[in-house]
Image (cartoon, rainbow, N blue to C red):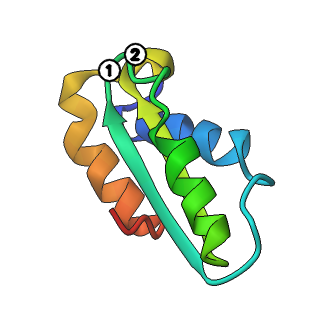
């Protein structure tokens, strides 16, 4: 059974790999939205479109705890991990 930290790392690796090739070239900005049931959010599409318009390599990931099988208790570890991965917000 994976540890608490391993579960978080596996979930974030999935998110990273899921969209690794969809970021436009240019100076990079990587942010995310954390929550539950957020899969229908249009925020990533809007932010990434504006980033492309500005010539930025803007990536906005949804980190949906429900879809990734994460618990509320994983929030602190997720925040630590995304900071280490270079998320800006």
Disc 2 + disc 1, Cβ < 8 Å: yes
Residue that protrudes farthest toward the right in the picture: 21
x then y, percent, for residue 24: 74, 66
Quadrant position of residue 36: top left
Specify whether 46 is left or right of 8.
right
Indicate the position of residue 66 as horizontal and vertical percent values.
Answer: 40, 15
Residue at label 2?
66
Q: Is residue 69 left or right of residue 14?
A: left
> Which residue matches tag 1?
36
Which residue occupies 42% across, 38% down? 8
Of residues 6 and 34, the one drawn nearer to the viewer in this rendering:
34
Q: Quadrant of the C terminus?
A: bottom left
Q: Position of residue 20 (x, y in %)?
A: 74, 52
The number of discs equals: 2
Q: Is residue 55 above or below residue 66?
A: below
Real-space CA distance between mark 2 and mark 1, rounded to the nearest whole angstrom: 5 Å
């Amino acid at each position: 059974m994976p540890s608490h930290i391993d579960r978080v790392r596996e979930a974030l690796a999935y998110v990273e790999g899921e969209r690794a090739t969809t970021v436009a070239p240019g100076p990079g900005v990587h942010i995310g939205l954390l929550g539950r049931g957020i899969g229908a959010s249009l925020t990533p599409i809007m932010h990434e479109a504006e980033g492309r318009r500005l010539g930025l390599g803007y990536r906005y990931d949804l980190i949906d705890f429900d879809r990734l099988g994460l618990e509320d208790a994983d929030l602190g570890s997720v925040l630590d991990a995304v900071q280490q991965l270079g998320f800006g917000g």
